[in-house]
Structures are given as C-alpha cells and as structure tokens.
Amino acid sequence: SYPVLPNRKYQPVTTTQYNDPLRKIKVVSFNVMPKGADFKNKLQRNDGLQGYRTRPNYFSWGRRGPLLIEEIKKGKPDIICLQGCDQFDYFQEKLTPRGFIGIYERTTK
C-alpha cells in the first residue's frame, strides 16, 4: 500500500487578475527522477548519515509513478511541469484522459 499523501499548502505567487478567481492558474512542478538513475538507493553522502540507505524499492518506478500521479490529481493543477522525466509516455497515458496535453523537451548537455 502507498503512504498517505502530504497535505500541501500551495502558495499564491500573485493575486488573481481583476480579483477574478476564474483567472487563477495553478502550476505544480515535480522532479520525477529518471527511472535508471544510479543515485536513488545509494545516498552517497559525506555527513553523519553516510552509509544509510532508504528502504529497498522506495525509489522504484512502480512506487514513484503512481504516487506522482496521485499527487498531481490531488493538486488539481492547470499546468504540470516535470523535470528529470524519462517516463513521458507513462504520464501521457495517465494524464491525457484528464484533459492534459503533453510536450516533451529532451535535455541537451
């Protein structure tokens, strides 16, 4: 089972235009962490927590993917920004039925 999602307090960046609540836009942004990233279960640290690891599979895509979708649905955003996203097709499949249109831009180094 998945943990209870945190109760996030969204911060307004500016007042709505003309004090019209229909002109409010909610943006959420998440760092997805690429599916195959080496650092996820290694926690390479140089402090007092060096050597501590997270629970096995804590960062697995099977756990993170559904949690991110639930977070997005709970936040009821108008715009979603995803960084470190190598699972665009997954998000496209889950969010298109909710009315979202996705644009993927590959990072260039």
Image (cartoon, rainbow, N blue to C red):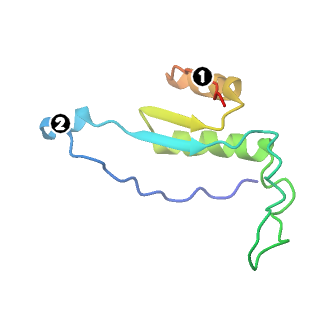
Where 92 falls versus 29 (above or below)? Answer: above
Q: Three-letter amino acid code at disc 1?
A: Tyr
The residue that appears at 83% across and 56% down in the rendered structure is 41
Report the front residue among 1 and 46.
46
- Residue 109 image offset from top left, x and y in percent: 66, 31
Q: Residue furthest front?
A: 109
Residue pointed to by mark 1: 104
Mark 1 or mark 2: whose residue is earlier in sequence: 2
Residue 51 found in image quarter = bottom right
Give the numbered dot on residue 17: 2
Classify residue 18 as left or right of residue 53: left
Residue 4 image-quadrant placement? bottom right
> Within 10 Å of the Cα at label 1, are there few (<14), some (14-19), or many (20+) other Cα atoms?
few
- Judge from the rendering whether residue 93 lies leftward or rightward of residue 52; answer left or right: left
Residue at image x 68%, y 58%? 3
Q: Is residue 23 left or right of residue 3?
A: left
Residue 43 vs residue 18, the one in the foreground: 43
Residue 17: image location, x then y, percent: 17, 36
Tell me what residue is drawn at x 54 percent, y 40 percent. Answer: 72
Alpha carbon separation for disc pair 1 and 2? 29 Å
Label 2 sits on what residue type?
Answer: Gln
Crowd rating for badge 2 (residues with CA inside 10 Å; few <14, some 14–19, many 20+): few
Identify which residue is drawn at 55% across, 59% down: 6
Above or below: residue 106 compared with residue 24: above
Mark nearest the camera among 1 and 2 is 1
* Mark 2 secondary-structure assignment: helix
